[in-house]
Amino acid sequence: MAGKQSFSGKNDTYTDRNGDVVHGMRENGFTSGNTQGLLASDISSLLEVRENNTQAIVEAIDAALAKSMEEIGLVAEGYAKKACPTDTGRLKNSITHLVGDGGRAAYIGTNVEYAVFVEEGHSTRSGTKVEGVHFLKNAATNHGDKYRAILRSNMGK
């Protein structure tokens, strides 16, 4: 049967509910009340870190995010090229991606002037309506699961 845990400020010890004792509690940053539920083995194996690693963590997250956006941009570019209608190949070959907003966003697009008519549709001179293909929009919006998987992979799940 488990006993009661106790902290002794006078002796600088902690006795866990199994009767195990840890000495030098104050030295390890523990005070009465902040050891609730811990066993002596939990406390004795703790490692104290007194360094502020916030900046290194932020930089690691930013780097992983930028890497994710580059990979997502490449994948989205591939989806757009695969769905792009081809006549001469000029439009398909012009599709590219860009990582922006400090590595926090990926953009796909083209600088070919008639791309908007292929993407959104248009009417011909004879009045025939040509439906848009939405090769860029669909590449950006229809593959969320793939893009989330890339983010998870680069962010360490």
Image (cartoon, grey):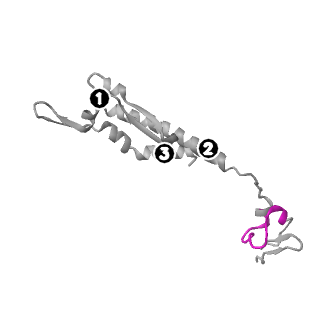
Q: Which residue is mark 2?
A: 60
- Residue 113: mark in rendering: 1
Neighbor class of circle 1 (other Cα within 10 Å; few <14, some 14-19, many 20+) is: few
Looking at the image, can residue 153 be seen? yes
Instruction: Give the structural element (helix, strand or loop) at label 3.
Output: helix
Neighbor class of circle 2 (other Cα within 10 Å; few <14, some 14-19, many 20+) is: few
Pointer 1 with pointer 3, Cβ within 8 A: no
Looking at the image, can residue 142 be seen? no
Which residue: 74% across, 70% down?
34
Which of the marked residues, 2 or 3, is nearer the chain's N terminus?
2
Image location (x, y in percent) of residue 24: 86, 64
Pointer 2 with pointer 3, Cβ within 8 A: no
Q: Kindly report which numbered mark, 1 or 2, lies closer to the viewer in this rendering.
A: 1
Q: What's the residue type where badge 1 is placed?
A: Glu
Neighbor class of circle 3 (other Cα within 10 Å; few <14, some 14-19, many 20+) is: some
- Residue 149: mark in rendering: 3
The quadrant of the rendering that contains the N terminus is bottom right
Which of the marked residues, 1 or 2, is nearer the chain's N terminus?
2
Q: Which residues are magenta?
A: 26-41
How far is mark 1 from mark 2, CA to CA? 39 Å
Which residue: 40% across, 33% down?
78
Q: Is residue 16 magenta?
A: no
Image location (x, y in percent) of residue 33: 75, 73
Asked if 27 appears above or below 109 in the picture, the reply is: below
Q: Which quadrant holds residue 89? A: top left
Asked if 27 appears above or below 68 in the picture, the reply is: below
Which residue: 78% across, 75% down?
5
Q: Kindly report which numbered mark, 1 or 3, lies closer to the viewer in this rendering.
A: 1
